[in-house]
Image (spheres, grey):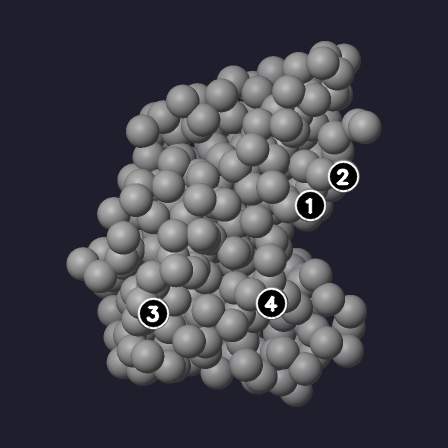
Amino acid sequence: MSSRASSGCRHKLQAVCSLPLLTVAVTYIYGQIPVAAVADARTGRVDAALSELNAAPKNAETHALLCSLYASVEHRDQAISECEAAAKAAPQNSTYKLRLARVYGDKANHAGMITGMQLVGKIRDSFQQAVQLDGRNIEALSDLGQFYVDAPGVVGGGIDKAQALVERLKPLSQARAHRLAGMIAAEKNDDAAAINEFNAEIAVSHSAESYYDLANFYRSRKQYDRAAQNAKQAIVADTLHGADTVDAAAMLIEMKREVPAAQTGLRGYLGATLSDDVASYARAHTLLGHALDISGDTTGAQHEYTAALALAHDYEPARKALKP
């Protein structure tokens, strides 16, 4: 997995940015959480982990893990409720505030325009509070920066604000500073500068996420062959077969390019020993099913959808894809 807690705020969406929450991993303290629930979460057994956690005493760590579990299967309202509870129980925890901003963003992305706009203030405030609580939280600085890039000024966005965060990121993470600078350049339609910044991110990190970021830029410009080339390279670079592999595979499947590479990456993810607190196996099985459908292997695809539902019985993308 990438060095950050999520694949970042990668997409420009409605009036705000929203994060690919399904592959988020946040580090928690597990002292008061049932061991079985931790094991089930780390191996993607969402139903089992939810059952165990909902029967356990509640504390900030329990609520935070419940939030990640619900987010991993797109139960957005439940995820928000649990993240709000975690942030309330541990008001000085920067990570919980960041996670709350992300689930608000995911909800906004999948809701109508009115609901999305109603959530913008909560998204902005939670990102800002995460940074205020820990000014060295690279994830929070990076995500707040993209919010400033994507959001209009009337709701608190602004390129000048994002540029200030580039300077704050430079001593903490050169890769993240280049990434945010690339997003700023892209927003200004200075594509040459954007490409230079994303390539600089690759040069300093050689990470899977850096290749994904360049792929995502090319996809936004409808340069799909270049997007596919870099998404494929992201899978190659992700030697631990983590969350970036899943995001890159999803991009390839969506574009219907380099689908065999996506299949290989997803199988690597499903077979890896992960450090993620919540393994996104339901999503990975479903994506692999889509890839197999594209390749004409409908039997194999149905097997993957069934495998996803065995982990999370009401994971809607798998339920929709599974043929009766």
Q: Residue furthest right?
A: 324
Residue drawn at x 25%, y 69% as measured from the top left:
136
Q: Is residue 190 above or below residue 258?
A: below
Q: Nearer the viewer, mark 3 or mark 4?
A: 3
Tag 1–tag 2 contact (CB < 8 Å) = yes
Q: Is residue 318 above or below residue 168?
A: above
Distance between the Cα atoms at labels 1 and 4? 14 Å
Q: Which residue is mark 3?
A: 58
In the image: residue 259, left or right of residue 168: right
Does residue 78 show up? yes
Q: Nearer the viewer, mark 3 or mark 2?
A: 3
Say which mark, if any, is on residue 75: none
Q: Nearer the viewer, mark 1 or mark 3?
A: 3
Q: Earlier in the sequence, mark 1 or mark 4?
A: 4
Q: Which residue is mark 2?
A: 320
Q: Amino acid at mark 2?
A: Lys
In the image: residue 50, left or right of residue 30: right
**Toward which corner of the image does residue 200 lie, by quadrant?**
top left
Distance between the Cα atoms at labels 3 and 4? 18 Å
Q: Which residue is mark 1?
A: 316
